[in-house]
Amino acid sequence: MSDHPTSPSSFPSNPSGAAKNSLLKLDARTKKRNASEARFKAYGVGAIALGLFFLVALLTSIIGNGTPAFKQTFITIPIELTESKLDKSGVRDIDVMKKVTTFGYKPLVQSALVASLQEHGIENPFKKAADLGKLLSSSAPAQVRDVVLANPELIGQTIEFRLLAGSRVDGYFKGRVDRDALARDKNLDAEHLDIADAMVTAGLIDTKFNADFIFGADASESRPEQAGIGVSMVGSLFMMIVVLCLALPIGVAASIYLEEFAPQNKWTDLIEVNISNLAAVPSIVFGILGLAVFIQFAHLPQSAPLVGGLVLTLMTLPTIIISTRASLKAVPPSIRDAALGIGASKMQSVFHHVLPLAMPGILTGTIIGLAQALGETAPLLLIGMVGFIASNMPDGIASGFLDPNSAMPAQIYEWAKRADPAYYERAWGGIIILLGFLMTMNIIAVILRRRFERRW
Amino acid sequence: MPALWLFITVLVLGLAGFILGRARVMKDADGDIRKLHSLPNYYGSNVMLSAIIPSLGLLVLWLIVQPMIIQANVASHIPTENYADSGALNLLMSDVRRVADGLDIAVSQGALTPHAAQNLTGTDDVRGILGRLGVALGTDVEDDILTAAQEYRIKSNIGGWIMTVAVIAAAILGFAMALKVTNKDHRARNSVEKVVLALLIGAASLAVLTTVGIVFSLIFNTIEFFKLYPAADFFFGTTWAPSFGGGSELGILPLFWGTFYISIISLLVAVPIGLFAAVYLSEYAGPKTRGIAKPLLEVLAGIPTIVYGLFALLTVGPLLVGMFGKDGSFGVNWMQGGSAVITAGLVMGVMLIPFISSLSDDIINSVPQSMRDGSLGLGATKSETIKQVILPAALPGIVGAILLAASRAIGETMIVVLGAGAAARLSMNPFEAMTTVTTRIVSQLTGDADFSSPEALVAFALGMTLFVITLCLNIVALVIVRKYREQYD
């Protein structure tokens, strides 16, 4: 602090006129210094404010763009399941019925839509039922077909179906699509939107929470309304199992050696330098390693969560080792001495006393490492976890590890690449789910630390 | 026997060893623990470890080595005139493996009898048979590939049987030998601890092994690339125009320029903000402000890069186009599309803020309090103290932090893949799309599985360059930081 008062206002100036060099009167130089002090402090506040502003902007952008993905527009119409079209033989033999493809169901669905518009007195300017059918998702016939194949006894009845609306109709109700934009769009016309508005009044269209987005599978490029993140979530889960099962034991073993047993020599130095360097190697280089070693050399299957897990394990190991070593170091030497003093071997003192005491810290570090691995994308691109449609849930444990699957961040990247606003919405929605997982993991880590951490 | 079952068998043997070993020593000591050298569990563990470890080691080794030997063996049966070079042979061998795997599936699903699978000839519709089972083959199967595949199957089959016998024999041998020496005077704890220590050393050495793996996987493919494409053209070429049809120009300079330009912009954003934030948090802020602002800033570091990539592509890019693009709010037409150097640079800068601020915060905090007190006591204001005493003292550490941040910026992938564009150009205009080393690695290596063309192999050369640059930056940064820390410890 300077000897001069920092704030001139706290010292009222002397009305009678003080001596020229009074300490109470700030000279020009002091004023300048104080101003520069205030300026410097303001820069600091500004920097923090800017940083927080970026955080808020990022989060607003994620939440604002992503929440619509959790809602979906559905069209509810009664469809008459005509026997003559769906099962000509009339014997309800599933294998015969399977021969009717979705193309056979399409006219049925479309004419049902036309009929239901007529019934509600909604004006329909389209001559062809197929044009009107663009209101529906192109997955609608498949949706009907699945129901029919599962319950053949429904044929001949008129059943009410809740079908997905097309992505642009969906976008219209979420404010993503408007009539001006449709002028340039060959998939949908403004008339469709008029019909859609009328259908809302008639209660045929509603927008509801969309569980399929969270639990469903990815869909092809033309059906964003059907795409979900569920399958890639399972892919991520299998990868995290691999990472946890390998990185935790190996990381803890390596840290125990380096912290408790390693002699001071060249080899130990080499290991330490390697670990700190690996922590800073770009993640894409680990992807190249995975491609060359696990896929090119060891011929493990491409796009398999097992390979992804192995690559992420190598990437996470340095993080886990660094945090484990820190928590081993935090256990006071008196614990070791006491154990050795009553006749435990060095190994016993470490495994029976030091390790259990360091466990909360180790788990915290492991969870944070897992969270980091869960969000990592770049290495997964190189081992082929993008560029295909992850549409099937794995059949079992082995297939979960070995069959091609995507992972959450890779799926988000895949959606972002498809250059369709409806898929962008899905990508933001996927990010909300991903961040939800990361936040939960970090909160668990913080709670673990608060609850079990011991101060010595 | 499949490897998984073999693994389980060995584990079961190990468990049995544990129980037997423990029981045997207890019997030897007439149930009196005091007569034993070690605790009874150590005797059990000793038997278990000597049954499991050598046999599992053998199993892993066998699984790695057997395919290599069989492949070399089978490859020698394919006439040399059928392939041009080693790359073509690799492709041929992957066909062979696929056909062999397909035949295995056919046999296991009962579509073919084992005998019929071995007697198929090129005239049979192998592709059709396998296609029905879900094994898609690109072309019809030629005669020698089929023969090679059958050869491959026979050899792997024999190899598999020998492996089963050898692994189980090793497990039983270890089991028996350990059980034989188990008596009450045997120093079981010492031998168990030796094994555990060896395992710990092995785990620690994995870090070295990973580095070696990275270096080897980069070096071999890079050498392969330089055989096909002159190194001088790669390092000094100013055009990047890969075409998988051949005749590509693969100069790295435009990629370097894009990488450095984006990194510089990101550092211009991150360094002032991060540094001022760190100074404020460590020197001015009270514990309350610090307790709120610091974790909030660090949230930025915990957000995955794919999120920043999407933020650049969909939020920042369009926003900047709205400002600097055609009909933008500034009335200039500088920016054609959302993907540009400035977009990626800005977003990457945001990502690096917490990185710089928390590293500098640590460093500023480690400047001894006596230096602050001395300066303040002489009448300097707080900001003068910071500018003239603390920052100079912390400078080496801060430089180290900036270098680490630069190495991150250079190696960052997702933000530039989504935000920077794909055009390789050497330009000074930050509003233009440019491309980076990492972006090109991704685009050269995704999709195409043929690793013998220079267009795919160039990715390994790019990766090598990236690895070397970031490694140098990291080492310099770590040395600086470490030296600085010692100064005040």
Image (tube, rainbow, N blue to C red):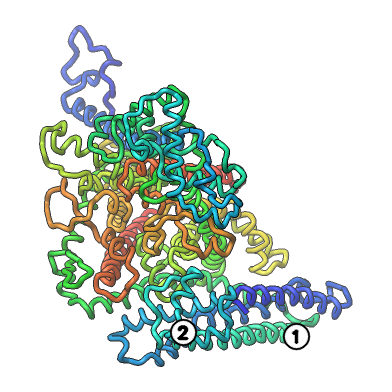
Chain for numbered disc 2: B
Q: Is residue A265 above or below residue B325?
A: below
Q: Position of residue B166 (x, y in %)?
A: 62, 87
Q: State left or right for residue A361 relative to residue B174.
A: left
Q: Is residue A5 above or below residue B54?
A: above
Chain for numbered disc 1: B
- What is the residue that sits farthest to the top in this orientation? A16
Between circles 2 and 1, the one closer to the viewer is 2
Residue B71 seen by the camera: yes
Q: Are marks 2 and 1 in contact (CB under 8 Å)?
A: no
Camera-side residue of B190 and A233: A233
Q: Is residue A375 above or below residue B135?
A: above
Q: Given the image, on which type of amino acid does mark 2 rest? A: Ala
Of labels 2 and 1, earlier in sequence is 2
Camera-side residue of A32 and B438: B438
Q: Position of residue A289 (x, y in %)?
A: 39, 69
Camera-side residue of B263 and A183: A183
* Residue with the mark numbered 1: B181
Q: Given the image, on which type of amino acid does mark 1 rest? A: Val
Q: Is residue A27 above or below residue A425?
A: above
* Residue with the mark numbered 2: B149
